[in-house]
Image (cartoon, rainbow, N blue to C red):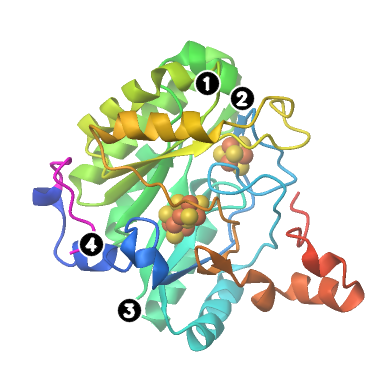
């Protein structure tokens, strides 16, 4: 078993079959990432919060490198792309939805994509990534859809810190600024993590490490999400996105990141092989093949050989 962890106590809640799936999940299992590929379906263009490290011309920075943009697909096109990729990438194991905005801010498309692919391939393993704002609304449906792996980005626990990270929260049509919106966001993240974990979903918590903002209390975040039942945490470096509020911040220093992961690793399983991949990533984590399967990428490739070197595929509004 590749994903067992004596630092966590969730095992008794895990549903039959989940650990076998996790052994083929390249993000949840270090060993699996050398062997198994994932594909992301870019079906979720909108976002419902404003992170200061994000520039919405690009993919969601909670799961992606800044400066990477992806095309957007309808659920039907996503299903067709899945079928094509499954044929060409025999080690494909996981189908993830990670933007380019937030999977749950586009719940209709996200849900329909999962259903269409499930009909086409009952064996597909699904994975979602979200900022967590809408988890109290949709976690029940996520469980009903039998999605076993969900990532929630939780950067802090208190609204004062959160107000330095999030510009606004758009909650059910109301745009809230300052701590009012952040309190809802942080509360919903924690409720969502707990609900999912109690329902047998393996929750990965991503944390963006921002020096001088949240780095001082990342161990407290890790401790809290562990109490809520999270399976693993993924402490990610801040990579300042051009055009974002934090564009002039220093990128997180690698040795400081490693020290934080070591510290938090005393309590909680840590992911250390994240590639901050794009919202339409395809292939092994270290060997992205998305351009091979991207219509926009192929058009650019045909027009200009320089563009083929670029990660940028199509701007997302
Ligand atoms: Fe995608 Fe994320 Fe699922 Fe993996 S990515 S939705 S958990 S299938 Fe993986 Fe990519 Fe890191 Fe994300 S390497 S950015 S952690
Ligand atoms: Fe950007 Fe993702 Fe934050 Fe939304 S949740 S603002 S897409 S980083």
Q: Position of residue 170 (x, y in %)?
A: 58, 31
SS type, badge 1: helix
- What's the distance in space between the residues labelled 3 and 4, CA to CA? 23 Å
Query: How far apart are the two marked residues, 2 and 1, measured between alpha carbons?
Result: 7 Å
Could you say where residue 6 lies in the image, as x and y percent from the top left?
A: 13, 45
Q: Given this view, does label 4 or label 2 mark the residue nearer the observer?
A: 4
Q: Quadrant of residue 186?
A: top left
Tag 1 residue: 181
Q: Are marks 2 and 1 in contact (CB under 8 Å)?
A: yes
Up/down of 263 relative to 193, above or below: above
Helix, strand or loop for disc 4: loop
Q: Is residue 3 magenta?
A: yes
Q: Earlier in the sequence, mark 1 or mark 3?
A: 3
Q: Residues within 10 Å of mark 1 (few under 14, many from 20)?
A: many
Q: Residue 191: where, in percent of width, then height?
A: 31, 32
Give the left or right position of residue 197, taking residue 127 as reference: left
Camera-side residue of 142 and 315: 315
Give left or right: position of 191 versus 212.
Answer: left
Asked if residue 158 lies in the magenta stretch, the reply is: no
> Disc 3 marks which residue?
122
> Mark 4 sits on what residue?
2
Which of the numbered marks, if any, corresponds to residue 190? Answer: none
The magenta region covers 1-10
Q: Which residue is mark 2?
A: 168
Mark 1 vs mark 4, foreground winner is 4
Label 4 packing within 10 angstroms: few (<14), some (14-19), many (20+): some
- On the image, the x and y values in percent for residue 49 come to 58, 33
As drawn, the residue found furthest toward the bottom would be: 87
């Amino acid at each position: 078993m590749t994903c067992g962890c004596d630092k966590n106590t969730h095992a008794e809640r895990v549903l039959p079959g989940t650990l076998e799936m996790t052994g083929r999940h390249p993000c949840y299992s270090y060993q699996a990432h050398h062997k198994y590929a994932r594909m992301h379906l870019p079906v979720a263009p909108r976002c419902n919060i404003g992170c200061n490290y994000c520039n919405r011309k690009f993919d969601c920075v909670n799961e992606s490198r800044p400066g990477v943009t992806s095309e957007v697909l309808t659920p039907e096109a996503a299903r067709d792309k899945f079928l094509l990729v499954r044929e060409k990438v025999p080690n494909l194991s996981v189908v993830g939805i990670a933007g380019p905005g937030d999977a749950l801010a586009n719940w209709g498309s996200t849900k329909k994509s999962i259903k269409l692919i499930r009909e086409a391939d009952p064996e597909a393993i699904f994975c979602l990534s979200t900022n967590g704002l809408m988890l109290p609304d949709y976690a029940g449906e996520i469980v009903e859809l039998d999605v076993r792996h969900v990532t929630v980005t939780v950067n802090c626990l208190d609204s004062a810190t959160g107000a330095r990270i999030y510009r606004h929260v758009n909650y059910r049509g109301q745009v809230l600024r300052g701590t009012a919106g952040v309190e809802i966001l942080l509360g919903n993240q924690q409720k969502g993590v707990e609900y999912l974990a109690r329902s047998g979903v393996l929750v990965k918590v991503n944390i963006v490490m921002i020096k001088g903002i949240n780095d001082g209390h990342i161990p407290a975040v890790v401790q809290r999400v562990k109490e809520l039942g999270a399976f693993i945490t993924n402490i990610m470096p801040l990579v300042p996105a051009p055009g974002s509020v934090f564009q002039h911040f220093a990128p997180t220093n690698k040795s400081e990141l490693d020290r934080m992961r070591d510290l938090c690793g005393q309590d909680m399983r840590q992911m250390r092989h994240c590639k901050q991949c794009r919202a339409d990533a395809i292939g092994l984590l270290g060997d992205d093949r998305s351009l091979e399967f991207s219509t926009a990428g192929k058009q650019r490739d045909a027009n200009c050989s320089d563009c083929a070197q670029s990660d940028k595929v199509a701007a997302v509004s």
